[in-house]
Amino acid sequence: MADIDVRLIEDPGDMVAVEELQRVVWPGGETEIVPVHMLRAITNNGGVLLGVYDADLLVGFVFGFPGLDEKSVDARPKHASHLAAIHPDYRDLGLGFELKRAQWQIVRSQGLDHIIWTYDPLESRNANLNISKLGAVCNTYIPEYYGEMHDGLNVGMPSDRFKVDWWVNTRRVEQRLNVQQRNSLSLDQFTSSGALVINPAVKNDNDILEPGNYSPPHPDFPTSLLLVEIPSNFQTLKELSADIALAWRLQTRDIFGSLFASGYIVTDFIFEHGDRPRSFYVLSYGEAQF
């Protein structure tokens, strides 16, 4: 890891590697690739493209551009982080965190305090980075955000997405980006403090975790902390059973849509390691904890 560093990418020649890395991370979806000419045009007009390199080899990148929160005369500026990718051989080394921290620094220097992006809420690796490590929050669920997709990661599954908010000047985010990372709380610590798992998974006869029965909180007495379980490896689950993967998608679509409408917000994420990893979103009621 001695030769790993993060660099700003501005030269069109260097952007060719970004285009190629997209093909590795999202195979089979040529129509979803952002080409060099678009990368060049956007970065020449306020966009930010950062790469992480192993010596001179590009092994990851993050790409975004300035935008507006809404279509109105008093719309608030923001940075829309559109793509983030790490080569499969370099995952779980903390490189995504380093890229996002570099993005945070540059966007703040541009005078913006709000970064947004979307991701598949059933991808636990992304959830752990975005929510737990970076301190983003979410109360927006968008069914079929991209419509039908054809790349290897998304084909055959509704393209539902979380839209997360990263308030870059908040104490919450600054603490999460500190060099000394916080110790994440365990499932037992959350449940012992009163948090409720509202859809605990159940193991079927083939040893696959299926979505359990959903027990919504009583609308008149909202519980301050709720836990929503998701698969710990959604891509593997899709290979084992597309039907069970779709069941997870549809159940969590209903759960998050209902909870967000009731005032809950995603504020943390739990990833339980072990022989059978399990993953849970933590939702707080109202503006508590963020």
Image (cartoon, rainbow, N blue to C red):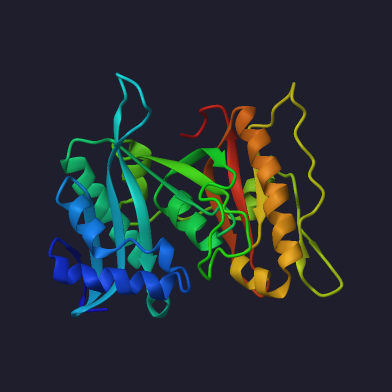
Residue 205 in sight in this render:
yes
Please state if 208 lies on the left or on the right of 154 as rendered: right
Q: Where does the N terminus fall, quadrant-wise?
A: bottom left
Q: Find residue 282 and report its image quarter.
A: top right
In percent of width and height, residue 124 lies at 55, 60
Would residue 60 appear left or right of 163 to someone viewing this image? left
Residue 82 or residue 12, whichever sits in front:
12
Observer-nearest residue: 234 or 135?
234
As drawn, 150 above or below 185:
below
Q: How many marks?
A: 0
Residue at the image point whose x is 18% and y is 79% from the top: 56
**Vertical relation: 19 (above or below) 264:** below
Residue 84, position as x, y percentages in the image: 36, 60
Residue 25: x and y in percent read 42, 71
Residue in the image at 71% along x and 56% along y: 248
- Above or below 114: residue 237: below
Point out the residue furthest to the right here. Answer: 205
Name the residue rendered at 30%, 27% in the picture. 76
Q: Is residue 181 left or right of residue 224?
A: left
Residue 91 seen in the current view: no
Choose between 190 and 168: the one closer to the eye: 168
Give 36 or 210, whichever is nearer the viewer: 36
Percent coordinates x, y for residue 199 in the rendering: 75, 49
Query: In the image, what residue occupies the spot 21% across and 67% down?
Result: 15
